[in-house]
Amino acid sequence: MGHNHDEQLASKVRAMLEESTQAAAGSLESSQVLKELDGWDSLGVVMFIGLVLEQLSVELSVHELRDCARIADLEALVAARVGARS
């Protein structure tokens, strides 16, 4: 799995995050703190979990997401799960 694939996955994670938090497309960056996102509430978290499951067939728990401080942590969590599956 090359760097390019990782970046593709990371941008997919950000796109799903944008959708679930109703942020503008392309507006989120890996360095951003999740708690500072307006839509990162219980509904946004549940929507994100649903999108990841639907698009990547990866199951995440609310608990795991709560442990993520930044968007980068979320990207790493999803990447680890996708990697573990392949």
Image (spheres, grey):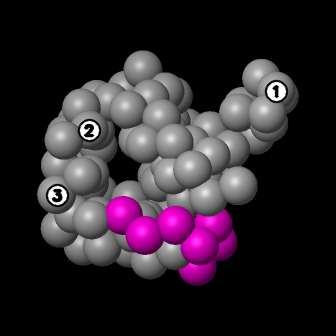
What residue range appears in magenta? 54-60
* Real-space CA distance between mark 2 and mark 3, rounded to the nearest whole angstrom: 9 Å
Q: Would you place residue 65 above or below residue 7 in this image?
A: below
Residue type (three-letter) at the residue carrying disc 3: His
Graded by Cα atoms within 10 Å as few (under 14), some (14 to 19) or many (20 or more), the crowding at tag 1 reads: few
Q: Which mark is residue 68?
A: 2
Relative side of 11 to 36, left or right: right
Q: Residue at x 70, y 33 (%)?
A: 6
Q: Residue at x 38, y 32 (%)?
A: 73
Q: Of marks 2 and 3, which one's residue comes earlier in the chain?
A: 3
Residue type (three-letter) at the residue carrying disc 1: Gly
Q: Which mark is residue 63?
A: 3
Q: Of marks 1 and 3, which one's residue comes earlier in the chain?
A: 1
Q: Which mark is residue 77?
A: none
Q: Would you place residue 80 above or below residue 47 in this image?
A: above
Query: Which of 84/8 is in front?
Result: 84
Q: Would you place residue 48 above or below residue 2 in this image?
A: below
Which percent across, then down, holds residue 31? 42, 20
Q: Residue at x 58, y 79 (%)?
A: 54
Looking at the image, do the residues carrying marks 1 and 3 touch, with CB atoms under 8 Å apart? no
Relative side of 24 to 48, left or right: right
State the SS at label 1.
loop
Query: Which of 27/85 is in front?
Result: 85
Q: Residue at x 24, y 32 (%)?
A: 69
